C-alpha cells in the first residue's frame, strides 16, 4: 500500500513536470516568450494599470464590458506585482496548463474508476498541440480550460458525495468560471437541474445544492453590479454578445470570425451598416448587432439552421479558416492528433458505453453538449472545442485492447 501510494504520487509529479517542460519548450521554439502580440485582454490589463480602467477601444468607441473580467484582471494583477513582466505571466500560464493535465486525470478517475486510463488522459492533455501552444500566448484559453474543468470536477464530486464543503467548492468553481466565460452558465444550470431530479426525494440532499448556486451567483454579482452602474441595465454580462451572435448569423457569415479569404466577417457587411456602427456608442452597437442578427434568423430560418449545422460540424471538425493565422506546421501536427483523438474517443465511448449511462456520464455529456450547442449559436473557432475535447474517452480507447471495462461504481451515500 505504501509503495502504491508513492508510485501514484511519482506518476503525478512526472506528468506535471513533463507537461510544464513541454510548454516551456514550445514557447521557446515558437518564439512566444517573453513577448507576445497584444490582444484585447492585454490592452485592458494595461489600461487598468494606467488608471484608465477596464476599457478597450473597439469600433470607434471605448468599451467598458468588452470581455468577461477574469483574464484581464489576472493579467493586470501579475503585471502589477512583477513590473509588467510578460515572462512571469506566460510561466504562470504554462504551470496552469500543466495543472490541467492533473485535472483530466482526476476527472478520468471519477468517471472510469481506472487509474491507468485516467493517466493516459492526462498524458494526452500534456501533448495536446493546441493546448501547448496557447499556454504560450496572452490568451484566456488556458485559464478558461482550467476553471471549466474545475467546475466539472466539482459537480462530479458533489454528486458522488453531497456535502456542504463540496457544495461550496462547486459554487466557487462555477462562479469563477462564470467570470471567465459565460457558456459555463448553461452547464451549471444543467447540473443543478440534474441534481434536483436525482435527489428530489431527499430534502437534506437538495439543501446541499443551495450553497453552490448562491456562491456562484455571489461571485459574478460584483461584475454585474459594476455594469449596472455604468450602463443602467441589470443583468448585463458583456456588451459584445450581440456582435458575437451577429458574426455567426448574417448573410456574410462563414461560421467563423473570418471569411475563407482571411478577411473579417465584419469587413464583408454592407457599408451603410458599418458606417452606422461607427456613429453609435457601446450599448447601441450591441443592440444593432443583436437586432440585425435576430432579423436575419427570423427572416431566413432555413439559412440560419444551415449555418447552425455548419457551426456544429466545424465545432467537432475543422473550418476552411483553420490555420489561416498560424504556420502550416501547426496544422500538420494538430490534424493527425485530433483525428487519432476522434478514433480513440469512438472506441473508448463504445467500450465504456455502460458508464455513459451513469449519472457521472450524463453530467459529462451535459458538460460537452451544453458548451457545443450554445457556442454554435454564435460563431466557432477550433479552440472553442478544446474546452471539451474528449481526451478522457480517447485515452479509454487505448485500453480497449488491453482489458475489459470494470464494473460501474455507485456514488457514495
Image (cartoon, rainbow, N blue to C red):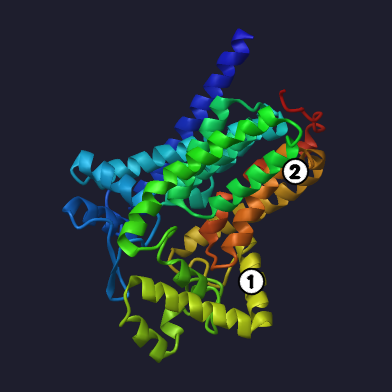
Residue 251, above or below 389: below
Residue 245, above or below 27: below
Residue 75, above or below 244: above
Residue behind mark 2: 348
In this view of the protein, can residue 384 be seen by the observer? yes
Say which quadrant the N terminus sits in. top right
Q: Quadrant of residue 58?
A: bottom left
Q: Quadrant of residue 370?
A: bottom right
Residue behind mark 1: 308
Instruction: Judge the density around disc 1: few (<14), some (14-19), many (≥20) Cα neighbours within 10 Å.
Output: many
Say which quadrant the C terminus sits in. top right
List x then y, in percent, for residue 25: 39, 43
Question: Total of numbered circles in the picture?
Answer: 2
Disc 2 is placed on an element classified as helix
In this view of the protein, can residue 136 be seen by the observer? no
The residue at the point 40 percent across, 53 percent down is 224
Instruction: Judge the density around disc 2: few (<14), some (14-19), many (≥20) Cα neighbours within 10 Å.
Output: many
List x then y, in percent, for residue 223: 37, 51
Disc 1 is placed on an element classified as helix
Q: Along the polypeptide, which appears first: circle 2 or circle 1?
A: 1
Instruction: Describe residue 400's horizontal placement relative to residue 194 as left or right.
Output: right
List x then y, in percent, for residue 392: 65, 41
List x then y, in percent, for residue 19: 47, 37
Amino acid at each position: 500500500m505504501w509503495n502504491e501510494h508513492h508510485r501514484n504520487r511519482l506518476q503525478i509529479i512526472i506528468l506535471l513536470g513533463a507537461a510544464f517542460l513541454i510548454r516551456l519548450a514550445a514557447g521557446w521554439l515558437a518564439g512566444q516568450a517573453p513577448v507576445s502580440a497584444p490582444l484585447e485582454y492585454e490592452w485592458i490589463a494595461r489600461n487598468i494599470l494606467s488608471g484608465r480602467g477596464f476599457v478597450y477601444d473597439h469600433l470607434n468607441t471605448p468599451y467598458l464590458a468588452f470581455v468577461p473580467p477574469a483574464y484581464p484582471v489576472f493579467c493586470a494583477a501579475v503585471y502589477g506585482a512583477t513590473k509588467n513582466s510578460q515572462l512571469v505571466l506566460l510561466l504562470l500560464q504554462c504551470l496552469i496548463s500543466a495543472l490541467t493535465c492533473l485535472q483530466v486525470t482526476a476527472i478520468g478517475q471519477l468517471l472510469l474508476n481506472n487509474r491507468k486510463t485516467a493517466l493516459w488522459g492526462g498524458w494526452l492533455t500534456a501533448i495536446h498541440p493546441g493546448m501547448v501552444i496557447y499556454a504560450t500566448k496572452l490568451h484566456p484559453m488556458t485559464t478558461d480550460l482550467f476553471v471549466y474543468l474545475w467546475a466539472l470536477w466539482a459537480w462530479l464530486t458533489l454528486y458522488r458525495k453531497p456535502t456542504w464543503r463540496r457544495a461550496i467548492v462547486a459554487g466557487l468553481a462555477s462562479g469563477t468560471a462564470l467570470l471567465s466565460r459565460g457558456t459555463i452558465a448553461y452547464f451549471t444550470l444543467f447540473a443543478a437541474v440534474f441534481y434536483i431530479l436525482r435527489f428530489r426525494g431527499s430534502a437534506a440532499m437538495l439543501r446541499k445544492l443551495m450553497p453552490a448556486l448562491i456562491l456562484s451567483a455571489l461571485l459574478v454579482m460584483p461584475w454585474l453590479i459594476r455594469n449596472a452602474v455604468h450602463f443602467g441595465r441589470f443583468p448585463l454580462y458583456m456588451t459584445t454578445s450581440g456582435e458575437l451572435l451577429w458574426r455567426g448569423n448574417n448573410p456574410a457569415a462563414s461560421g467563423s470570425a473570418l471569411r475563407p479569404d482571411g478577411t473579417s466577417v465584419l469587413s464583408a457587411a454592407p457599408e451603410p451598416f458599418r458606417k452606422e456602427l461607427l456613429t453609435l456608442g457601446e450599448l447601441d452597437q450591441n443592440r444593432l448587432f443583436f437586432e440585425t442578427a435576430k432579423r436575419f434568423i427570423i427572416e431566413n430560418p432555413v439559412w440560419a439552421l444551415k449555418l447552425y449545422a455548419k457551426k456544429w460540424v466545424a465545432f467537432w471538425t475543422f473550418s476552411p479558416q483553420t490555420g489561416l493565422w498560424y504556420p502550416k506546421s501547426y496544422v500538420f501536427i494538430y490534424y493527425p492528433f485530433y483525428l487519432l483523438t476522434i478514433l480513440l474517443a469512438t472506441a473508448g465511448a463504445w467500450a465504456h458505453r455502460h458508464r455513459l449511462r451513469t449519472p457521472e456520464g450524463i453530467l459529462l455529456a451535459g458538460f460537452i453538449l451544453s458548451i457545443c450547442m450554445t457556442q454554435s449559436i454564435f460563431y466557432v473557432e477550433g479552440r472553442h472545442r478544446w474546452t471539451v475535447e474528449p481526451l478522457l474517452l480517447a485515452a479509454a480507447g487505448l485500453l480497449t485492447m488491453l482489458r475489459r471495462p470494470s464494473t460501474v461504481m455507485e456514488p457514495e451515500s
